[in-house]
Image (tube, helix red, strand yellow):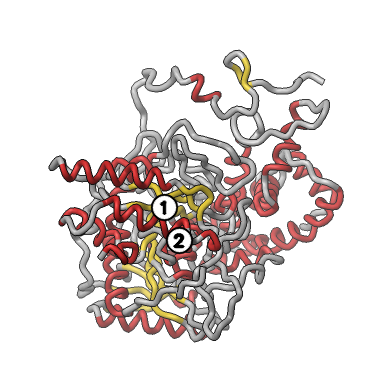
Amino acid sequence: MTNNLTDLTVAEIRDGFRAGDFSAREVAEGFNANVAAAKALNAFIVETPEKALEAADAADKAKAAGETLGALAGVPIGMKDLFCTEGTQTTAASHMLEGFVPTYESTVSGKLWAAGAGMLGKLNLDQFAMGSSNETSYYGNVISPWRRGGGDNVALAPGGSSGGSSSAISARLCPAATGTDTGGSIRQPAAFTGISGIKPTYGRCSRWGIVAFASSLDQAGPMARTVRDNAILLEVMSGFDPKDSTSLDLAVPQWEANLSSDLKGKKVGIPREYRPDGLNAEISAMWDRGIAWLQDAGAEVVEVSLPHTKYALPTYYIIAPAEASSNLARYDGVRYGQRDLPDGAGLQDMYAATRAAGFGPEVKRRIMIGTYVLSAGFYDAYYTQAQKVRALIARDFEQAFEKCDLLLTPTAPSASFALGEKQADPLAMYLNDVFTVPASLAGLPAMAVPGGLDSAGLPIGLQIIGKALDEQTVLNAALAIEERSGFTARPDKWW
Amino acid sequence: MSIDLQTVKKIASLSRISVTDAEAEAMVPELNNILGWVEQLGEVDVTGVQPMTAVIPNHQRLRDDVINDGDVRDKVLANAPQAEHGFFAVPKVIE
């Protein structure tokens, strides 16, 4: 049993620990060993094996003393390095924040620790969560544990921005991890690595203590191998926080207890605009299989239309950079992070030198786009227009949900691609988020769940989009797919 | 609407990011590609549409006007590149 503790799901670890099948320490030691042996994946920026052991020992002690155990007692997890963790360096994968050691804990990570989870380390990501392949990190690319079949050793992208999370989970370095999703940063990396991940309704998870990218879009969420594990983590991560002005003051539903893959009476909408000419044939075929699986689970399928879909990406690439240019103005070399002070420089020169040295190329590109679309004379033509189109995109979803209860779509337009393949062209990279961005703009819950492998042996996934606050239907439909896809594939260990 | 080298330098200056001439020149086609692509939004009819600022209806909360935080000066300064006498220190501001 102790040999394969790292193959267990969150639910299995939680239940096995409570039943006394193994100790929390054994589990933590198992994952610590996997983390230490997987440097080739570069999934972690900082490893914290001592934190994982500390939480495990506390769980073992609490259990021995007969105390009430937290929902995640005995479960070690990975923490995306976008969440501020008190006493542990938090960088957002940037040089700008190298050496930044928060003196406070983010609300979401604090909830996870309070529930008994232990931290295996801080997971690598795209710099400031800006990227779809994990190639913009100052701390190097994260490598996917997956490889194409036939002896192909090309390094593949784990997706982004939560690429450290996706890579680590699929390689069994952690049973679950946190992610954040601004335009697809939980769902696309989950799809690329054959795992599940859910972005809840905007406002479910507090943004307090998460390094901000685009505040009207940023949402935290869990990533794990099963739908049930996502439900378990999301319950712990969600909840009202007075420190976040957009936090929803609502009770957290019992998503795990209410999981049911019986979809009788549910209507699944298939948005016709998500099947453009030239859609990858294998992605299209997977979508058809997903439709059949949901019908098999009792759901009725209806075609719906989201007419403004083609404008979602350009809308996103105005709104997200605009908010980023404002949010990232805080990196001034004064209060935290790097400072670059050329000889004889005044304050303004210091700002410009610090930001030139601290930000990577993609971050600079987005700050500058954002600055431009917010600048005098262009604000209405770009930013206000994008906010209006965003309202139309949200209205499309409202009208579609008059005819159905959930939507089924592909998660990404392709399986994982090779590192370096799309780096030369920012626009080609942005197109990766074509299916995930619309739900982000509308603030809706959306989940990625694996469907199967493509002909190259790489995972491809399906996306479920739900009505605002209806995470339960999203999780239930994902469960129905999970039960029918029989997806058990895992990467062969080469690292 | 296309932007030139001078505009790129102006945006960089507004963004407080120093760029070399070579960097600025490389950014001209990059930024033009992206801006040219987002300009397709201009073709959408938005007559009568209010700009969206909040995706999920939520009311702005008020709280009692009492002190509920503070007295953490050293924590606030703990990550400053330069802190002296309980203050953030910066280079000269007056030219």
In this rendering, position of residue A148 left or right of residue A60: right
From the top left corner, tell me how far across and down residue A431 is, in percent.
59, 68
* Residue at the top extreme of this rendering: B85
Q: Residue at x 35, y 66 (%)?
A: A225
Amino acid on which the number 1 mark rests in the picture = Gly
Q: Nearer the viewer, residue B26 or A40?
A: A40
**N-terminal label among 2 and 1:** 1
From the top left corner, tell me how far across and down residue A376 is, in percent.
71, 41
Quadrant of the image containing the C terminus of chain B: top right
Q: In this rendering, is residue A141 above or below A205? A: below
Proximity of marks 2 and 1: CB atoms separated by less than 8 Å: yes
Question: Residue A40, located in which quarter of the rendered image?
Answer: bottom right
From the top left corner, tell me how far across and down residue A268 is, in percent.
32, 74
Question: Residue A256, located in which quarter of the rendered image?
Answer: bottom left
The disc at residue A168 is 2
- Mark 1 sits on what residue? A78
The disc at residue A487 is none
Question: Residue A57, located in which quarter of the rendered image?
Answer: top left
Marks counted in the figure total 2
Q: In this rendering, is residue A307 above or below A70? A: below
Q: Residue at x 54, y 54 (%)?
A: A125
How far, Cα to Cα, is label 2 from label 1?
8 Å
Q: In this rendering, is residue A111 above or below A473? A: above
Q: Residue at x 47, y 51 (%)?
A: A80
